[in-house]
Image: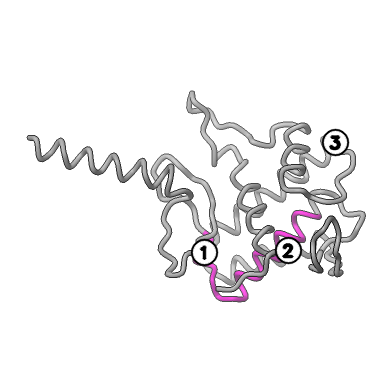
Amino acid sequence: MLIPHDTRIALDVVVDLVNTAPESEPEGDGAPADGLGDIAALHTFAARHRVSGVGELDEKDLRAVHDVRARFAQVFAAPDARTAAALVNALVAAAGTTPQLSDHDGYDWHVHYFSPDASLADHLAADCGMALAFIIVAGETERLRRCEAPDCRHAFVDLSRNRSRRYCSSRTCGNRLHVAAYRARRREAAG
């Protein structure tokens, strides 16, 4: 599956955004943590993903991004492509998409789907929504997944050639479960 560079970046952003939700990230004491719990965290998220045009952010922006995040989580939970498409259509329409070519900050020409004065929430809804639309149009909604590790609910986009990825990270969740299974087999063999 060939995915343009800017679409891949937007897919990484939407996955990271969904994974900041409290239901995706348990704290040490079992209570859910919100990776976007305050405006400072929102600024950090935008800076980490090099979101262009982010000005001053306030509580209204934080609430709007939380809403967009929840709606993206629904796309990952959608039972079929038709449901996912309806959710993405609603997100993109609400963001007031305005496709335009841009070549800023050392990047080659690429498409921005948001207006230059868009809020952070609209920017994320438009850009990430269009990246998800690309996946839906390609007939690949089954690639939008949640980690199969019992104690992890992270979202991810399975870009493996044969669509076989089961865990958000083979280094953490996948390896942890494989080691646990190995130890269980060893204990059983030892009797």
Considering only order in the chain, which callout, 3 or 2, is on the residue closer to the N terminus? Answer: 3
Mark 1 in CB contact with mark 3 (< 8 angstroms): no
Residue 128 sits in quarter: bottom right
Where disc 2 sits, the SS reads: helix
Q: Which residue lies furthest to the left in this view?
A: 191
Q: Is residue 142 magenta?
A: yes
Q: Who's the residue at 59% across and 31% down the image?
A: 33
Quadrant the N terminus occupies: bottom right
Secondary structure, magenta segment, majority class: helix
Q: Position of residue 182 (x, y in %)?
A: 23, 43
Q: Residue furthest front?
A: 106
Q: Who's the residue at 71% across and 67% down the image?
A: 89
Frontmost of labels 1 and 3 is 1
Considering only order in the chain, which callout, 1 or 2, is on the residue closer to the N terminus? Answer: 2
| Residue 51 versus residue 38 in the image, above or below | below
Task: Say which of 1 and 98 sits in front.
Answer: 1
Q: Where is residue 87 in the image (x, y as percent from the top left)?
A: 66, 63
